[in-house]
Amino acid sequence: MDALVNDIKVLVDDKPVVEALASLAERFPGKAVFSTSFGIEDQVITHFIFSNNLPIRVFTLETGRLFPETYYVWNRTLEIYKGDIEAYFPDTHAVQQLISQKGPSSFYESVENRKECCRIRKIEPLQRALEGASCWITGIRSEQSDNRQGMSQVEWDTTNQLIKVHPIYNWSLDEVWKFAKEHHIPYNPLHDKGFPSIGCAPCTRSVREGEDFRAGRWWWEDKSKKECGLHAT
């Protein structure tokens, strides 16, 4: 797989984002997908895809626990760009069983319970969303967390057995916001309320001045555990 990763690096390294995305769509016809959670980084990539009519499938994970503000920006994105965003829901039986046995807030009780909830609401639906895909595009940036600094712009995802590309991996947050404002990209209002990283409502809070970018995610847990498993390193 190293040879394939190197080939894809040639396609995207030092290329403008739209050019890199177009190259990926051409290299993986009908099999390049982008996952959005409607954070500002994902909104920027969605803008590139829809504004340039790139043949890249866009999907999101509808966990059933999202903020009202997330639904707002989801709807605004559909209104503005007129592109399809496929929604993948968790398995109904698995959610019913979890809540029946452990209640609606078991994720606060232990890391194991939280990971179980993430597995049901996010990881299993992701696996369905990635079926048949060969290239998974994300909005990950290196400065978002210590874990993500250990990634690279192009990777081989062993778990899902596909190429994974982060087109704005080396962008700073200031660059992201500058681009978003210049192009009038719709964004989640929670960003204006101290939420740099936005996930499920029960598991996300605003961050305080000086706190880490992802301090508001699963804030009751140790910093080293703050990944849900979607982006394993």
Image (cartoon, rainbow, N blue to C red):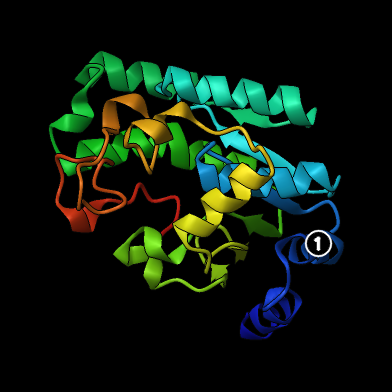
* Residue at x 66% of width, y 84% of height: 6
The quadrant of the picture occupied by the C terminus is: bottom left
Query: Which quadrant holds residue 113?
Result: top left
The location of residue 39, given as percent across then percent down, is 50, 40
| Residue 48 versus residue 189 in the image, above or below | below
Instruction: Please name the amino acid that badge 1 sits on.
Output: Phe
Residue 90 located left or right of residue 193: right
The location of residue 66, given as percent across then percent down, is 43, 24
* Residue at x 62% of width, y 51% of height: 179
Q: How many marks?
A: 1
Helix or strand or loop: what does disc 1 sit on? Answer: loop
The location of residue 198, given as percent across then percent down, is 40, 37
Residue 212 located left or right of residue 86: left
The location of residue 177, given as percent across then percent down, is 53, 49
| Residue 47 versus residue 19 in the image, above or below | above
On the question of residue 108 being in view, the answer is yes
The quadrant of the picture occupied by the N terminus is: bottom right
| Residue 25 versus residue 73 in the image, above or below | below
* Residue at x 45% of width, y 17% of height: 68
Q: Which residue is mark 1?
A: 28
Residue 86 located left or right of residue 220: right
Residue 151 located left or right of residue 100: right
Q: Residues within 10 Å of mark 1 (few under 14, many from 20)?
A: some
On the question of residue 35 being in view, the answer is no
* Residue at x 70% of width, y 49% of height: 33
